Image (cartoon, coloured by chain):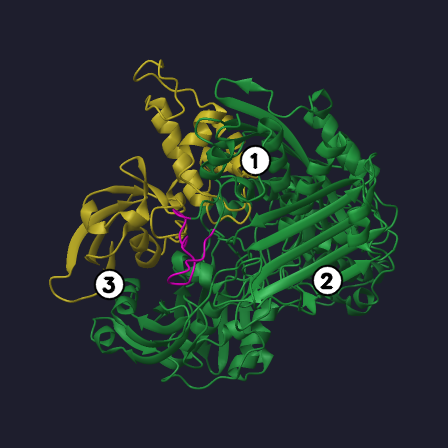
Amino acid sequence: MSAGVLGSLEAGHTSSLRLRVNGEWYELSLDNRVALLDVLREGLGLTGSKKGCDHGQCGACTVLVDGRRVNSCLLLAVALDGARVTTVEGLGEGDGLHPVQEAFLDRDAFQCGYCTPGQICSTVGVLEEAAQGYPSAATDPDHPAGEPVPLTGDEIRERLSGNLCRCGAYPNIVDAVRDLS
Amino acid sequence: MTDTTSELGTGVPRREGRDKVTGAARYAAEFAPPGRLYAWPVPAIVAAGSVRSVDAAAALALPGVVDVLTARNTAPRAPADDPTLNVLQDDDVPHRGWFVALVVAETLEAARAGAQAVRVHYDTRPHDVTLTRDHRERYVPEEANGGHPAVRERGDAPGAFDAAPIRVDAAYDVPPLHNHPMEPHAATASWEDGHLTVHDSSQGSTAVRAALAQIFGLAEDRITVTSAHVGGGFGSKGTPRPHVVLAALAARHTGRPVTLALPRRDLPAAVGHRAPTLHRVRLGADPDGILLSVEHTALTHTSRIKEFVEQAAVPARVMYGSPHSSTVHEVVPLDVASPSWMRAPGEAPGMYALESAMDELAERTGLDPVELRVLNDPADEPDSGRPFSSRHLVECLREGARRFGWEERDPRPGVRRDGPRLTGTGVAAATYPVLVSPCRATATALPGGDYLVRVNATDIGTGARTVLGQIAADALGAPGDRVRVEIGDSDLPPAPLAGGSSGTASWGWAVHEACATLAGRLAGDPELPPEGLTAEADTAEAVEAGSPYARHAFGAHFAEVSVDTDTGEVRVVRAYGHFAAGRILNARTARSQFLGGMVMGIGMALTEQSTLDPAFGGFAERDLAAYHVPVSADIPAPPAIEAGWLDEADPHLNPVGGKGIGEIGIVGMAAAVGNAAHHATGVRFRSLPLTPDKVRAALAGVV
């Protein structure tokens, strides 16, 4: 599938690459300046990933690249040839919701909804990181290396602090993530 | 019609929840009409002066750049009532960050590069952005925001203060604060056959339509403004903002649809801010803690183009009884961006000052801070003498104290030490007025048993869709899933904005009335015409009749903090808010809004501050790395943070019985945290936020 060209057509300023987004391969010819977030939102019409600051300061653009959470506004798309990208649109199976999406709904873990896709993708990343034993600043230094880290309230608050929510839904987000862990 | 148990009051899940967790909910910049262009603004980099020339040649030479709009090359528009909307109208630069050009391009990347390539030459004049207590341009305005008189005097407050046996005389500072909703202000505009369609990130698209009609000289029926999903606003999207004017202008200029999403760093100067307030509070009391005199003076700044006066001394007119009172607002016009609404304008900074002073009075009199407030709870509104429609502050204080565990508190400050950390608890009261505006709505019974409710309400994250559906279902006696709710489009019956905690009362009143009328017409089970049977409501007359009562919501905030005496870091370890805000219409979304207000209040207390740069003008903290909105780690995890409320039945409000809940959650939070910091350390902090540098310096040599 081709999404056409994003950005300038000037010779020497574009690159060709392949991206697998939500299970589908795209052949892209991109302006070298284009960030992954803008590929998703403007090129592929996947506007679920949000632009809150465009500077990696708010986390609204969080998606999963090769299974790890990233700020997609900070990634130049040309550096991602062959990468697998999962956005909020690609989390559920068909009409079914991903368990993290269900948990956010159950806990009213959002208000305006603008940070929500990033919070949800970030949570998917956190669950995996904790399961694989990656420590955070809140992890007990004596925790055995590589063992799954229990997601306590402190762990969740620490690990999700890269995702701002101005509506202040943090208490409900913490409860939603607790429900999953 | 079916008889159902009413869902009103229960925690019905958000109607648009699924769209928000799947990414399907579409916000203003996410509409992509064919041929859409992208715009990028060029903000002024001088604090005061005028544009001498704009050199767009380098920008226009870039691939993809379509045009560079300036005051010189765009067709004239009519001036707007709000001067902040008169962008690209003339060469004047009233403050740093004022938009002086707009680049339109085929792609975001080209628009951004184009904006960087535009060269603007300025003639500058000396500027002043610094608010000081003795500023020579200080004056007393006629009114403060909300139409409140700037000055109210009862009795002889200074004389009573001088004669009072117990006196508190303290100054408090609140810095400039930024709303920073997560969705930056954005609009997508297109013109087709003389009709302007705009998807705008706004708290009320009826008002946006009116402003665009005025500016572009169009009849309102030739403009449609939608705000289906809005990524927060907190007041900053409460009035039309320059981005929507620029998007519409660029679309007309180029003949193509245009999206303008403001870069985050341009928000502080372009969308309003909470102006800094310098307070002086003087409380005179007898030895038993009974207030004899209350004085609150609030000094703030405004811009050179617009007088906006944060009404920070107004809550002192509501809160406590005293025979003598003086509440005064003063303002200094500076070369700063125009301030505007931010969540609980007036109440949030004003109650920080008043409730901090009350804590100081409690300490001075040896009274428990909860008891001091109970003692001074007035029977009638002190300023107006009018009876309260309902006032349950005392009940909020008592029940909040019970749930928080206040009764075990040792009143001595500075005695709870654990290693380098000191802990303490604090309380503060909260108040917010009941506001309501005229609104229209329709309700239609459709063949097949469904109902359709139409009103141009806006859901900025409050759950408006959901609660209006509940109100309609309740009035119709129908199950909620049979009621469709259409909001967020200016083609719908006109409605006021989502602001001032007035949305649900205003829209809900009209929806209730339309549905009640419709239910009456359906009483005999008439045969419905194919298009359905519609009832209309317009609450203008009923709303404008006003009320003989003083109508306010009240609440009580409690906080426990831990202060690190080595680093100066203050952390909130527990927070509780208890509220009396009329009938709570949706327990689930109401709790979320109360907690959200408390979170923003913790930010106000501990992390949020902006600074005006005296050398170059403008705000120094322009992005989310420099301006610290609270993150998850700053907020206690439940149950260490919680909100509750009492069932308050107030017959003097509106048919739905709610007082509004969007703002009161922030009002007392900062004072409760500050008072807790005093209880922890024994040191008074009177300047927000309580950042480690200030706290460390204040504690040096004391603890």
Which stretch did the figure color magenta? B610-626
Query: Which residue is pictured at 45% across the width and 86% down the height?
Result: B76
Question: Closer to us: mark 1 or mark 3?
Answer: 3
Q: In the drawing, does residue A142 fall left or right of residue A151? A: left
Give the amino acid at mark 2.
Ala
Residue B194 left/right relative to B311: left
Q: Is residue B622 magenta?
A: yes
The earlier-in-sequence mark between 1 and 3 is 3
Q: Which chain is green?
A: B
- Give the CA separation, mark 2 to mark 3: 47 Å
Image quarter of residue B573: top right
Q: Nearer the viewer, residue B334 or B196?
A: B334
- Which residue does the image show at 50% across and 61% down from the upper left? B201
Which chain is represented by yellow in the image? A
What is the three-letter code of the residue carrying label 3? Gly
Residue A7, numbered circle: 3
